[in-house]
Amino acid sequence: MKRTEFTKIDMKLVKEIISKKGFYYFSLDRVYERFCGANYIIVTDDPHFKERHPRFAKEIIMTPAQFELYAAEYNDRIAYDDRERKRILKKEERVLNETELTADDTVENQVMRKLQNERIYSAVKNLTDKQKKRVIRYFYYGLTERKIAEIENVSYKQIRKSIEQAKKKIKKFLK
């Protein structure tokens, strides 16, 4: 299941929607990949909402004040995820641009490592952009497939398949 990029919850807009429509709904798919139970959080001022709309009786019903606390937590999580994504992308950029050799190595070791790195770099260059990012995150940073999936908002099975295909391409290139 591909998850989309999420935007922060604007409580002013939520209250506007409630005043026009009588309720606002928030899909729990935005937060949980597989959530058992309710599908939505319904935000309303109407204390009799469940009786008037029985089809929503199994959903989570909140007042705007209750939802405001939830929205603040959600917005904090989105901001944290964005910062984490940017931090990882900056780090990846540095890795791709890294060509420095350490001064205390022998010249032979430096040359051998440089040649080996160039072969690997050439192999990685032949991957798709997504595969490059995923391979760097997985092998260089040691992130799990699930963590990479969380960062990219995709299923971990997609990440696993992508990394396996990338490994095959790299092996083929290095033969």
Image (cartoon, grey):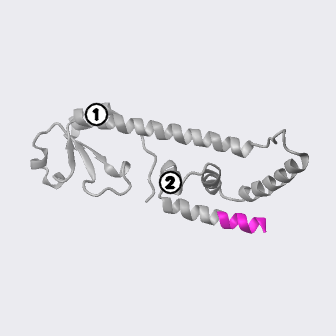
Q: Quadrant of the N terminus?
A: bottom left
Quarter of the picture containing the C terminus is bottom right
Q: Amino acid at mark 1?
A: Glu
In the rendered image, the residue lying farthest to the top is 12
Query: Label 2's element?
Result: helix
List x then y, in percent, for residue 54: 13, 53
Task: Please state the horizontal and vertical placement of residue 92, each as a whole percent of the image.
Answer: 65, 44
- Judge whether 145 appears above or below 66 on screen: below
Residue 13: x percent and y percent?
A: 31, 34
Q: Is residue 71 visible?
A: yes
Location of residue 62 by image quarter: top left
Question: Badge 1: few (under 14), some or many (20 or more) residues near its Cα, within 10 Å?
Answer: some
Q: Residue at x 54, y 59 (%)?
A: 159
- Camera-near label (1 vs 2) is 2
Query: Which sits in the foreground, 144 or 82?
Result: 144
Q: Name which quarter of the figure residue 79 lies in.
A: top left
- Identify the mark nearer the N-term, 1 or 2: 1
161 magenta-colored: no
Element carrying mark 1: helix
* Relative horizontal placement of residue 28, taking residue 98 as reference (left or right): left
* Residue of label 1: 68
Residue 12 horizontal/vertical position (percent): 31, 30
Answer whether labels 1 and 2 touch (C-beta < 8 Å): no
Residue 42 position by quadrant: top left
Q: Is residue 90 left or right of residue 152?
A: right
Provide the residue designation for mark 2. 149
Q: Residue at x 54, y 42 (%)?
A: 85
Q: Which residues are magenta?
A: 167-175
